Amino acid sequence: MKFCSQCGALLTLRIPAGDNVPRHVCDTCDTIHYLNPKIVAGCILEWQDRILLCRRAIEPRYGFWTLPAGFMENGESAVAAAAREALEEAHAVGEDLVLYGLYSLTHVSQVYLMFRGQLKDGYASPGHESLEVRLYAEDEIPWDQIAFTVVHETLRQYFAERQAGAFHPHLGDIVRGPDGRFHIHRYY
Amino acid sequence: MKFCSQCGALLTLRIPAGDNVPRHVCDTCDTIHYLNPKIVAGCILEWQDRILLCRRAIEPRYGFWTLPAGFMENGESAVAAAAREALEEAHAVGEDLVLYGLYSLTHVSQVYLMFRGQLKDGYASPGHESLEVRLYAEDEIPWDQIAFTVVHETLRQYFAERQAGAFHPHLGDIVRGPDGRFHIHRYY
């Protein structure tokens, strides 16, 4: 961020009065430009004993499998965002969505809101961001071809809980370890 | 948003190729500037049979009571953001935070993440955004002086569940009714 989106002047990076974090400040029109985490809303959609995955037709992680998920838009609710992503990426209608996981990805300033719900009529077909979509049984999940750690962890938790017979919402952070790999810190 | 924050050129509002929503697009450097909802993280902190409220020293709703809450920062986790807000607004240390409510405020494109936890040592004192802070028992809550609908609804749910003896996470949207007033749509 170099220029003020309000007046076009050059920005200064400094700590404003009364704050304790450097911000992009416009000294011409006095606007402070805050940067905040973005929300990614997604969902596990169930049909009988299967769940919906999409194979990515876009970068990053082109060709890898993921849950339908994407950036929440201004003016929509979190539930609506998760449902919209399933519709866009897999022409899938999600029903009875409940919040299943909240994960903070501090390294990219994203918060994932992962829902769980039913896939209406078991129907899905690839949207323009998907190479293919498929309903997977647990023993078919391509664990070594999952696009993102947060999706991998969400799926792992889901199948563990399904076997145990009860789902509970989860809270966690995805963090980079000393070895450079990402792993999950689970609060619960 | 009028100017490109990358190159300073004037922006155009139009639907980019492959998209279906108008975006602020820079035709000089080809950057698309997305606008996304902001996250507000806050918490109910408990001490014995009381909870912490803060009286706002800032607009909007100067002088009204609220739960400690504020905009999540880039690079922090949701739990850390809620704890930081309690520390900044009330010098209060929150422990054992669990997610209690997720509320979408579509009219302002905000998502509230409300946690519940313990107030360490029962200690609180006003931070620079608070006129005063206080530990309230249920029958002392100033219901007609609560700053925001989302806080009012969070507190109402909290005390109802406390009386029932069990807390469950909640999902809802705060929406404006035909009468212009805000109310909650609860999914659960």
Image (cartoon, coloured by chain):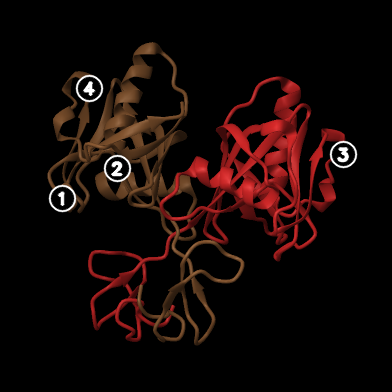
Chain colours: A red, B brown
Can you identify the residue that label 2 sits on?
B68
Q: Quadrant of residue B18?
A: bottom right
Query: Badge 4 is on which residue?
Result: B137
Rendering coords of residue A171 (x, y %): 55, 39
- Residue B1: which disc? none
Tell me where residue A168 sits by quadrant.
top right
**Which-is-in-front pick, marks 3 and 1?**
3
Q: Does the image show residue A113? A: no
Specify which label sits upstream in the sequence, 4 or 2: 2
Q: Give the letter of the chain under mark 2.
A: B
Depth check, front residue: A34 or B121: A34
| Distance CA(mark 3)–CA(mark 1) | 56 Å
Callout 3: SS: helix
Q: Amino acid at mark 1?
A: Ala
In the image, what residue occupies the spot 52% across and 78% down?
Answer: B31
Are the residues flagged by discs 3 and 1 in contact, CB closer than 8 Å? no
Contact flag, marks 4 and 2 (Cβ < 8 Å): no
Which kind of residue does numbered mark 3 sit on? Glu
The disc labelled 2 sits on which kind of residue?
Pro
Indicate the amino acid at tag 4. Answer: Ala
> Image quarter for residue B177?
top left
Mark 2 or mark 1, which is nearer the start of the sequence? Answer: 1
Give whichever of discs 4 and 1 has the lower sequence position.
1
Q: Secondary structure at mark 1?
A: loop
* Residue that numbered label 3 is attached to: A140
Nearest to the observer: residue A51 or residue A145: A51
Q: Are marks 4 and 2 on the same chain?
A: yes
Relative vertical location of residue B18 with respect to residue A86 in this rendering, above or below: below
Q: Which mark is residue B57?
A: 1
